[in-house]
Image (spheres, rainbow, N blue to C red):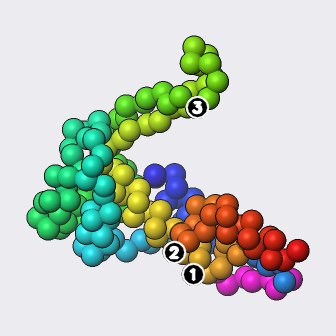
Amino acid sequence: MKNLIHSLRQSSRRKIYLVFPNGIIHDSIPSLCTMDVTEDKVHKCLQKLRADKSPRVDDISPRMLVEISEEIVVPLTIIFKESLDTGSVADDWRNANVCPIFKKGKRNSPENYRPVSLTSQICKLLELLIRDELVTYLELHHLIYDSQHGFRKGRSCLTNLLMFLDSV
């Protein structure tokens, strides 16, 4: 995280030129150096947690976090702000349980499994905040092409295929 914040600060000092598909050159894209963590954003992330999921490596149940969200939103906001300001995370957030998940093929072959890391619930909340902020920034400044459908809200392989068929 520290390296990410450092590289974001460094990139804010360089002039970035983007050429869009229509040929327009854009050179005034604001940098993404600061992230505003508010109690409202943290509370929304807490409400997005799925209560039916099992506890992770920290043994904190998502159901418990959802139920006590009103009481923990202020302390979590302070912790998240401090983590982003210092560029470091708690040591407990770095631990993960790695579980092999079967993909396809023979079950006795290791290459037919993919690893899934189960990290701390609190760390996942911070990751969600960062992801939402990053996606909002990219979409607000038109840094993602309209043809990009993967990992975007309201977009899928089906919408990509439909847009392609519509253009043909």
The quadrant of the image that shows the C terminus is: bottom right
Any magenta on residue 152?
Answer: no
Main secondary-structure element of the magenta-colored stretch: loop
Counting residues from the start of the chain, the first of labels 2 and 3 encountered is 3
Q: Is residue 114 left or right of residue 143?
A: left
Q: Residues within 10 Å of mark 2 (few under 14, many from 20)?
A: few
Residue 39 lies in what quarter of the image?
Answer: bottom left
Residue 34 shows in this picture: yes
Circle 1 — which element?
Answer: helix
Q: Which residues are magenta?
A: 23-30
Left or right of residue 119, residue 134 in this image: right
Rendered residue at 43%/37% (across/down)? 117
| Res 136 label | 2
The image shows residue 168, relative to residue 150, as above or below, that is below
Question: Which secondary structure, mark 2?
Answer: helix
Q: Which residue is mark 1?
A: 140
Whether residue 25 is in magenta: the answer is yes
Q: Earlier in the sequence, mark 1 or mark 3?
A: 3
The residue indicated by pointer 3 is 103
Amino acid marked by disc 3: Lys
Amino acid carrying mark 2 in the image: Thr
Q: Residues within 10 Å of mark 1 (few under 14, many from 20)?
A: few
Report helix, strand or loop for mark 3: loop
Give the residue drawn at x 36%, y 52%.
Answer: 124
- Residue 118 picture quarter: top left
Three-letter amino acid code of the residue under disc 1: Leu
Residue 44, placed above or below residue 121:
below
Cα separation, mark 1 vs mark 3, equals 36 Å
